Amino acid sequence: MIVSSWNVNSLNVRLPQVLDWLAAQQQAAAPVDVLCLQELKLTDDKFPREAFEQLGWHMAYTGQKTYNGVAILSRQPLTDVVLNNPRYEDEQRRLVAATIDGVRIINGYFPNGQEVGSDKYAYKLAWLDALIELVREDLSRFPKLVLCGDFNIAPADADVHDPALWGEGLHVSPQERARFFRFIDELGLKDTFRLFEQAPKLFSWWDYRNLGFQKNQGLRIDHILASPALATSCKRSWIDRQPRKNKQPSDHAPVLAEFA
DNA sequence: ATGGCTCACATCGTGAGA
C-alpha cells in the first residue's frame, strides 16, 4: 500500500494537477493507493466527487468555505469514517479518519499558529494535545495506523533550510516540536521519512515568495507517521518535488510512503 | 530583508498562509 499526502492549497485551483498527478502515479510500478489532501478551501457541496468517482476512487471529506478542508481518496473502500476529532470541539475542518484494508488512516491539516504566543498558536497546541489523545485511543483499536498530513511542524533542524534564520519561531518552536515528539516517543509512531537514508535539504514546502523553491528555501512540514506494527513493513518514504515545478503550483509537494 | 506570492472573497483591498 502506498499512502500519500498533499496540501493542495485550494482543490478548486489544483484539481487538474491532482488528476494529472494521480494519472502519472498509475504509470508507476507501484501506484498510489491512498491520497490524503489538505487545504481544500471548498464546502462539501463543491467537492469534485464525480471527477474522482469516474476514476474509481472512494473518498471521505469534510470542508468549509475559504479555509481548511481535508479529504481521503482511496482505491479500496473506506470504513469507520470519522470527521473531525470527537474529543475536540472545532469549527475548523481539519481532520478526517477512515480504515482502509485494515489500516487506520488519520489525515490532518494541523493549525498554522500564525505567531508564537498568539491565540492561534495556543489553538495549535491545544489541537495537537487533543489529537495525541485521539491517536492514543485509535492505536488501541487499530494496531496498523498512519497519521499523516500537513503538520505545520518541522521536527528537526535537518528539516529546515536555514535553522539559524528560523530560530525558535513558528513551525520549529520547542513547544510544537515537543508535541511532534510525543507522537514518536510516547505513542511509538515512526516518522517514515527518517526510517531511511535521505539526502540533505529535502523539503515538502517552499514559500511562494522570493523564489523559495528555486533556491530550495523550504521546510519539511508534511509527514507520514506510522504505528510500530505498520512501520516495520515500510519499504520507502519520499517526497515528489515534481508537482512543485508545475505552472500555478501548490506551495507544498506530495509526500509518500510505501508499506509492504 | 517580514516584503516579495497566491488564494478566497456577496473581490478590486484585505486577511491568511508558513
Image (cartoon, coloured by chain):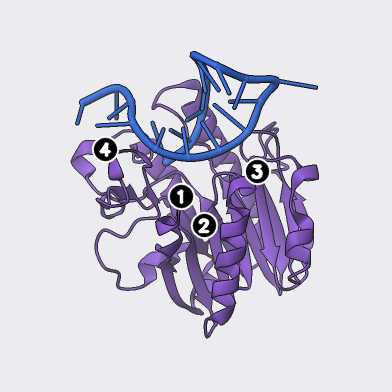
Residue to which mark 2 is pinned:
A187
Mark 1–mark 3 contact, CB under 8 Å? Answer: no
Residue to which mark 4 is pinned:
A166
Badge 4 density bin: few <14, some 14–19, many ≥20, Cα 10 Å: some
Q: Residue at x 73, y 68 (%)?
A: A57
Mark 4–mark 3 contact, CB under 8 Å? Answer: no
Q: Is residue A182 left or right of residue A158?
A: right
Q: Nearer the viewer, residue A7 or A175?
A: A7
> Where is residue A123, by image quadrant?
top right
* Marks 4 and 3 belong to one chain: yes
Q: Nearer the viewer, mark 4 or mark 3?
A: 3
Q: Chain of mark 3?
A: A
Q: Which chain is blue?
A: B
> For the residues marked 4 and 3, what is the alpha-carbon distance in whole angstroms?
27 Å
Residue to which mark 3 is pinned:
A69
Query: In what element is the residue under mark 3?
Result: loop
